[in-house]
Amino acid sequence: MLFQDADFQKLLLLHSRDRRCQKLHLEVKELPQEVARMEEKIAVEKKSVELALAEWKGLESQNNSLEKEILSMNDLVNKQRNRQLEVKKNEEYQALENEIVNLLSKIEERENEQIEILLKIDGARETAEVAQGKISQRVAEMEKQRDERRDQGEEKKSELIDLEKEIEETRKEVEPSFLSTYDRVATIVSRPPYMAPISDQKCSGCHLRVSNDVVSSVLVEKKITQCDQCGRIVYVER
């Protein structure tokens, strides 16, 4: 039976290494895009931390500005009251009183704004602390995964170089007629595998039923046999 033939076993070995090589090529090719997607996710997470901190600091800045404004207006109220003690005309006194009332009204408005901002600050501070804690930890984990993927990529590149050398050596050992048929099948068949075992009289490559002639050829003759449906090299594992 062909499956037990030493030359055919070498061809199976070549096929196995070719498939591994194709898979490695694809993984190495897709790695930069995968790392880029991870970088994007990391950037989004970092941005969320920055936004949370910026909101907190922004509210703190607004609160400080309001605090200064309230203090300034209180100072002005005190000055106007002191001036009231010095004026002699009722008109001047009343004018100062009106100004004081307006200032006190503005102070009340600013104090109400400050209360709202202080409440927001509490929420923003909590959000920022969570962001700095949990999100920063998640970012660190994602960065670790990214670095690991990069390292794996370098390892796969090195493995690919070694595997291509092994394939080159294996091709030299395969019987020429087998190799010629194999190369032709690899060119014709749209995707691997290029060699497939027959199970229940079906090609495991295309999953279609093969003819009795194909089965007979595989079992009896020591020559390369192809699936009469997809063209793959078929064999029986015995």
Image: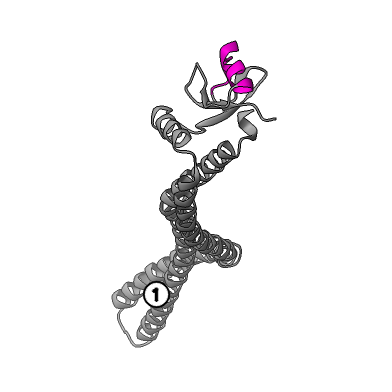
How many other residues sit within 10 Å of disc 1, few (<14), some (14-19) or many (≥20)?
some
On the image, the x and y values in percent for residue 47 come to: 44, 60
Residue at the spot x=53%, y=39% of the render?
Answer: 11
Relative to residue 151, is residue 238 depicted above or below?
A: above
Quarter of the image where the C terminus is located? top right
Q: Looking at this view, is 199 or 27 the one in front?
A: 199
Residue 100 location (% of width, % of height): 39, 73
Residue 9 in view in this figure: yes
Looking at the picture, does residue 33 appear above or below residue 5? Answer: below
Q: In which quarter of the image is residue 222?
A: top right
User: Whole-percent x and y of residue 31?
Assistant: 45, 52
Q: Main secondary structure of the magenta part?
A: helix
The answer to whether residue 211 shows anywhere in this view is: no
Residue 82 located within the stretch drawn in magenta: no
Residue that label 1 marks: 69
Amino acid at the residue labelled 1: Glu
Q: Which residue lies furthest to the bottom in this view?
A: 86
Locate residue 77: give its quadrant. bottom left
Looking at the image, which is closer to me, 86 or 189? 189
- Drawn side of residue 88 relative to residue 24, left or right: left
Start-end of magenta stretch: 206-220
As for residue 214 lying within the magenta part, the answer is yes
Q: Is mark 1 on a helix, strand or loop?
A: helix
Residue found 34% across the figure and 77% down from its top: 93
User: Where in the figure is residue 173, as x and y percent of width and height?
Assistant: 50, 46
Residue 21 is left or right of residue 129, and the answer is: left
Q: Please name whichever residue, 230 or 234, is drawn nearer the observer in this view of the structure.
A: 234
Residue closer to the observer: 122 or 171: 171
Q: In this view, does 13 lie above or below 217?
A: below
Q: How is the image coloured?
A: one colour
For residue 132, above or below residue 205 = below
